[in-house]
Amino acid sequence: MELEHQRIAILMADRYEELEFWYPYYRMKEAGAEVVVLGPGFGPEEVHGKHGYPARIEARARDVKPEDFDAVIIPGGYAPDLLRRDADILGFVRALAEAGAPTAAICHAGWVLISAGVIRGKRATSFYSIRDDMVNAGADWRDEEVVVDGNIITSREAADLPAFCREIIRALRRACRQKLPEIFCPTIESTKDQ
Amino acid sequence: MEEMKLKGKKIAILTSEMYEDLELWYPYFRLQEEGAKIEIISMLESPLDILGRHYYLLKTDKSAKEARAEDYAALIIPGGYAPDLLRRNEDVLQFVSKFFQQKKPVGAECQGLLVLAAANLLEARKATAKANVQEEIKKYSREKVQWQDRDVVVDGNLITSRTKHALPTFSRELIKSLGG
């Protein structure tokens, strides 16, 4: 499968946006990746989305090493406002972004990129309501379904999820080639054969 | 650059009020990611805004009366309470039956099987469902389904899935059955 041996963190806190969490969560598993649901250092293990769907935090950012992960995905909702209060979450995101690992944020998750200090000078998008926050933090904001600037991947809202995940998977394939010999990375042919 | 595996294909999702949100939206986004076009079919006059069990808003495209199975490469029936509403409608049952006549892939998730049972399409088919759905089908259908204790079962054109957690496997099988 496309993303075998890749380990991806999806950040999670209360009042997360369900589709923006569950679509990438199942999608990365469908592609064969290992997915870890990573939360801040506070709050219960069981959290609920904006629409009431429960989800479980599997690990806390303070207890993991960024170098053990190949990418981070940050769903939207109001969870990003909780996530950005946790220094370990911000340190985790900054470490991955600076290491060149795919760092993907959708909707209100731009808030986490802002507080992690990784958005200045980058082309990016977000939910329109936090556009000013993004611009004030130094992002070159675009109104597009997905914006890729280096390893930073951003989308506006749930309806952009197909494009968002397509770019995350593409970025993980690229990152694999930079890190490992070609033979360990999925080729265009092998993904066609599935 | 990798190809989108389902470019140019049109796929019908059959649903109604009280659909199970993730079982609808996962395949909805997933097939779009592969380039497919999705249409939402309901028994109701369309277009219409409907709500899922968790209140995700969805716009329907066509009623089962207007929609023609010939126009679609596959059919998906997500679960929730929507299938219980759908199965009471004759146009829905005819629409679904045509996919079987035309041997096109049909994916039924969880309670979605209730619609197939009501259209008498499950005789001797291998399928999976949660115990409560199996019970419900036994109650009013004489057809003998060969229940399998697996999360996802593929039997010819029929792909069934019993829980949300099987969504990755379910959609992998669905895409495979569409030649992707």
Image (cartoon, grey):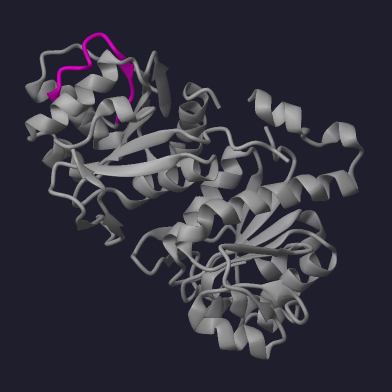
Residue A165 is one of the magenta-drawn residues: no
Q: Nearer the viewer, residue B65 or A65?
A: B65
B17, above or below A13, in the image: above
Residue B121 is one of the magenta-drawn residues: yes
B142, above or below B81, in the image: above
Q: Quadrant of residue A134?
A: bottom right
Q: Residue furthest bottom?
A: A136
Indicate the position of residue A47 as horizontal and vertical percent values: 44, 66
Indicate the position of residue A58 as horizontal and vertical percent values: 58, 57
| Residue B174 as seen in the image, left or right of residue A72 | left
Indicate the position of residue A147 as horizontal and vertical percent values: 66, 65
Q: Which residues are magenta?
A: B118-129
Point 27% across, 17% down: residue = B100
Picture quarter with the N terminus of chain B: top right
Q: Residue furthest top?
A: B124
B3, above or below A142, in the image: above
Report how many numbered discs are placed on residues in the image.
Answer: 0
Q: Quadrant of residue A159?
A: bottom left
Point 57% across, 72% down: residue = A143
Q: Quadrant of residue A137?
A: bottom right
Is residue B135 among what the camera can see? Answer: no
Picture quarter with the C terminus of chain B: top right
| Residue B120 as seen in the image, left or right of residue A89 | left
Point 17% across, 23% down: residue = B117
Q: Which secondary structure dominates the residues rendered in magenta? A: loop
| Residue A1 as seen in the image, left or right of residue A181 | left
Point 64% across, 80% down: residue = A86
Q: Residue furthest right?
A: A181
Is residue A165 among what the camera can see? Answer: yes
A176, above or below B77, in the image: below
Indicate the position of residue A184 as horizontal and vertical percent values: 84, 34
